[in-house]
Amino acid sequence: MSEKEIKSLEEIFEAKIARDEKIEPKDWMPEKYRQTHIRQISQHAHSEIVGMLPEGNWITRAPSLKRKVALLAKIQDEAGHGLYLYSACETLGISRDELYEQLHSGKAKYSSIFNYPTLTWADMGAVGWLVDGAAIINQVPLCATSYGPYARAMVRVCKEESFHQRQGFQIMMTLAEGTPEQKEMAQDALNRWWFPALMMLGPTDDASVHTAQSMKWKLKRKTNDELRQQFVDQTVPQAEMIGLTIPDPNLKWNPETKHYEFSELDWEEFWQVVKGHGPCNKMRLDARRNAWNNGEWVRNAAMAYAEKQENREVKQAI
Amino acid sequence: MNNNLIQYIYGIADNSLILGQRLGELCGHGPSLETDIALTNISLDLFGQVRSYYQYAAKIQGNDTTEDTIAFLRKEREYKNVLLVEQPNADFAYSITRQFLFDMFHIELLNELQNSKDETLAAIAKKSIKEVSYHVRFSSDWMRRLGDGTEESNQRVQTAVNDLWVFTDELFHQTDADKAMVSEGIGVDVTQLKQSYYHKVSAILEEATIEVPKIEYFQKGGKQGIHSEYMGYILNEMQYMQRTYPNMNW
Amino acid sequence: MKNWPLWEVFIRSKNGLEHRHCGSLHASDATMALENARDVYTRRMEGVSIWVVPSSQITASNPELNGETFEPAMDKAYRHPTFYELPDELKHM
């Protein structure tokens, strides 16, 4: 194709997205669109499956049977969501194994929040309430993103996730209403998770490299700072409702802007965690690599069996 | 209060509790995402069954007993699960073999239990049969895949079968509570299930090109509350919250 | 070693409705694909029947040929009932 032809294809393509038409896997798309989507969708998928680990840490120790099944079901959903997203990503011509390879080699990123440790049961509440809460804010607009398979996966994810945040908040609420010890546990979890949750919504707009292009392709509808503000505005009253204190001395309501003001975040910490220096980066990646490597003989066995079965069927047919 | 009935319920439900707990350890660590999801489903089914049984046992006991005091506050000797289900997830072959050896028993048990004179137990059994039938399908399919897969997988499953076989006989032992319940038409006479169990298990092992171990001396004890060394650690983790923070709501 | 192939999953949500494509997954064989589909895609009672098809077995039309493939149908209004204008008094037609 000549440069001119590509240019005209790109114009048609961009116009299609501007009209809110969806792009489907076999449609022509600019290489940059494909690459950006592979990056974002796979990061999203990786975040789901790495995100299983901090919560998985508490399955065997959940304090009641009811909490145990809810937690298990939630983590299982995350595996499902990872799977939907990997599938969406595979329609762009990259295999799940290649995507895993990128994760395991450290080339691909996942949400930095999962590199923080879950130290008490209240962390299950904080993760559900804050981390899932922040995730939902990010995800809901993606249901209308331009790439069809991604948008469809997100519709499914958002529908299923609706119980996750409620599950987390209810854990926090129960603790906040419980004994002083329990309330302290809840407050401690909020103290540890608040700022990482805010950072989870991504770097400030001036430091975010992908925003403009992503807006055009509807991979993003609002900027990171707008999303963060939305998250703070909706979460602060929830904390107040259950009598917990947001660990930010500078938090205050601005009646003019009708938004909360809050402290500058520690972006140095954020970038260090992204670069691999968070408290659990190594542990999380090791767990994923081990699961994959230890599973290799299992996956091989299943393939070998399938091939034997097929050969047997062919022989019988002859 | 019918203490034999309570002990009988524990004898059934504790198996699902401990096996569910073991499967829960695997969540997030499976050999493929799809398999991870499937194993978690089985774990969820088992915990669901546990809750029904314990809620019933709690109702019989009255006072402040709940499903959670039963699950989390008994002492090790008071758990009546078989040794098989407490065996660790040494590798995927162990986890699948343990599942398979238990599922094949579980389905036979439930098939009989649905005819129990105790309507609650019969109802729980009826509901559980659908779930456990699927477990049987899942674990026996995997036994075939691993057994008749590669040389490595065959060897691993053969090792797991050899190691876990010694725990199968206990499935058919009867406690005094079991005997009492059988005579009242509530409990299942597990001794009657033994022949069919070994017959069916051996048939699938044969399909999986796995040799049936020739073992004459078996391990036992779980049903009497005398467990393996693993059990203390399982409970330690499982009861951690309830023991560290007694008498709280979660 | 070869990786588990990709399968497309179709679910009938209730009798009377058609199977609809709902996503894909990996499995080593058809039996496993069905089992995985059940565990992955029907956790919330989404279905009463499942089809799985190896993704490699699907032949798709080429979107670059969409013009010649689909547009010729656009000007064939006579295939639609509204093409035939009839008196309002006429009932049941």
Image (cartoon, grey):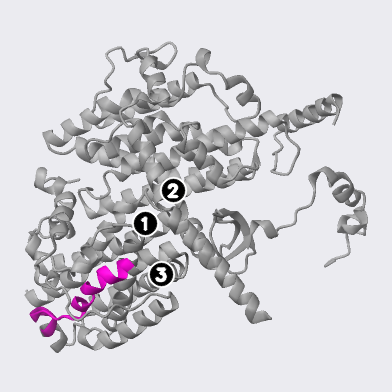
In the picture, the disc for residue A79 is 2
Residue B171 visible in the snapshot: yes
Q: Are marks 1 and 2 in contact (CB under 8 Å)?
A: yes
Q: Please give left or right for residue A225 compared with residue B200 in the image.
A: right
Q: Secondary structure at mark 2?
A: helix
Marks 1 and 2, how far apart at CA: 10 Å
Q: Mark 3, chain letter?
A: B
For residue C56, side relative to residue B224 (left or right): right
Return the residue at label 3. B143
Q: Amino acid at mark 1?
A: Thr
Q: Nearer the viewer, residue C45 or C36?
A: C36
Q: Write down the residue under mark 1.
A: B40
> Which image quadrant for residue C92?
bottom right
In the rendered image, the vertical position of residue B72 relative to residue A209, given as above or below: below
Residue B170 painted magenta: yes
Residue A100 higher or lower than A187, as above or below: below
- Identify the secondary structure beneath mark 3: helix
Neighbourhood count class around disc 3 (C-alpha, 10 Å): few under 14, some 14–19, many 20 upward: many
Q: Quadrant of residue C10?
A: bottom right
Q: Which mark is residue A288?
A: none
x and y, in percent, of residue A304 in the image: 52, 64
Please give the range of residues in magenta.
Answer: B159-179
Q: Does residue A244 sit above or below A132 in this rendering? A: above
